[in-house]
Image (cartoon, rainbow, N blue to C red):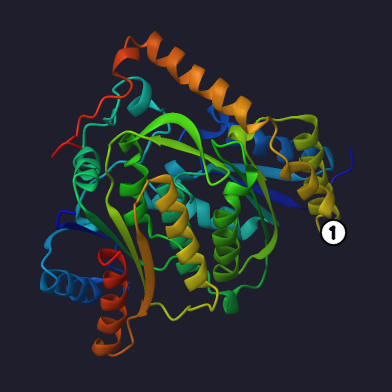
Amino acid sequence: MGTQALILDGGLGDGRDTREVRAIIDAVLREAGWQVALLALRDIDISPCLGCFGCWIKTPGICVIDDAGRETARRIVQSDLVVYLTPLTFGGYSSELKKALDRSIPNILPFFQRIKREIHHVKRYARYPRLIGIGVYSDGRADPDDEELFETLIHRNAINMHAPAHATCVVDDADPNDLRRCRIERVVEKVIGS
Amino acid sequence: MSTTNERILLLIGSPKGLEGSNSGRLGSRVVDGLKERGWSSESIHLHQAVRSEEAMEQLLAAIRQADVVLLAAPLYVDSLPAPVIRAFERIAAERKPEDIERVARFASILNCGFVEPQQNRTCQRMLKRFADCAGFEWVYGVSLGATGRTTKRVCRALDILVEALDLELLVSEEAGQLTDKPVLPPWLYILGGNMMWKQWADRNGVKDRLRARPYAANGN
């Protein structure tokens, strides 16, 4: 396994920032011997997916929109580990993270196959990155079901995007630094140790 | 046709808009059913609404006037398309449940590109969470596979939703029973779907490059 990690930071910047948690993830991964790249998605102009399937049947493997979404998809599939970092938004991803994920489907094939008794898309590449999902509570709207919902979403994405290992955690911005770091260390260990 | 003072707001979550999308077709069926019962309606394409502050203000105003808000959207990577999430982030930020005088009901129709309607479940849960956060009363989520192909069973389920919205009833379990079963056997969906992708690629002259790996690195 290589050691190139990519953090996709879906922070919103409206009081729902993720920078502190991002710094903890960055430090934990570097201390574990990983090279870490970061995309602060709020600062990157990525147009929405058009739903045109052009990336499958016109320009196979490359989105028809020529913007930073192409580079993001490339960096995802060329990484060994991708971290989805997001303010927990209705139990799922922020719009900033999702704009990048919607544009990552060129990395899989249009063809269908059955995986665990469900239909999913076939791999385009031989290898895909491991996946860590980290949700951040910062708006005081915590719900007891959110953590399980976020975990389910990451699990579903891991199947669809062929991640060989995945794990999630939810941290609260109001928690002490040590507690947040402890949770992130645990989830990183779970994925890179597997 | 009788008339009521009730109003439905249809939110289209597909980038292809009201006229060009399966989401628009499915949502319009429910809207038309309610219009036959005397409701008034308005439709907003969320991908357009998030492009300007003026359009977003119009969206927020339309929500304030609605008795029912219906989202019709495709499933993208197990969730909503990014512009829909962006619109919902803003709606939830503007609408504090404790300050809302008029609680509109919220329903959804999701369609995914896989044959199993159950693949929409995670997203339906997120929509219910959104409804709670934004001060709506959650009614029901219709989950459809096969890009929302409309069979008699699907049409009947949408009719049940129309009746429940009109009469302010709970949506009966029959709606779920009608839509839970895939509209095609999975093996047939795989066979037909894979043939379709090849035909489309052939038309574009890229059939031989369908499996291209433009970002391959280190033997990947």
Amino acid type, mark 1: Leu
Q: Is residue A36 above or below residue A53?
A: below
* Numbered-mark total: 1
Residue A181, image x and y in percent?
25, 82
Camera-side residue of B213 and B200 = B213
Q: Is residue B145 above or below residue B120?
A: above
Residue plotted at (47% across, 72% down):
A147
In which quadrant is the C terminus of chain A drawn? bottom left
The answer to whether one can see residue A137 in this image is no
Going by the image, does A114 lie left or right of A187? right
Using the image, name the chain to which the residue with label 1 belongs: B
Residue plotted at (29% across, 31% down):
A63
Camera-side residue of B69 and B201 = B201
Going by the image, does A160 lie left or right of B64? left
Residue B74, image x and y in percent?
53, 41
Q: Is residue A19 above or below residue A4?
A: below
Residue B172, image x and y in percent?
84, 54
The answer to whether one can see residue B14 in this image is yes
Residue plotted at (71% across, 40% down):
B31
Residue plotted at (30% across, 41% down):
A47
In which quadrant is the N terminus of chain A drawn? bottom left
Q: Which secondary structure, mark 1?
A: loop
Camera-side residue of B34 and B211 = B211
Camera-side residue of B3 and A84 = A84
* Residue A170 quadrant: bottom left
Name the residue that disc number 1 marks: B169
Q: Is residue B206 above or below residue B50?
A: above
Going by the image, does B99 lie left or right of B214? right
Residue B54, image x and y in percent?
41, 50
Q: Residues within 10 Å of mark 1 (few under 14, many from 20)?
A: few
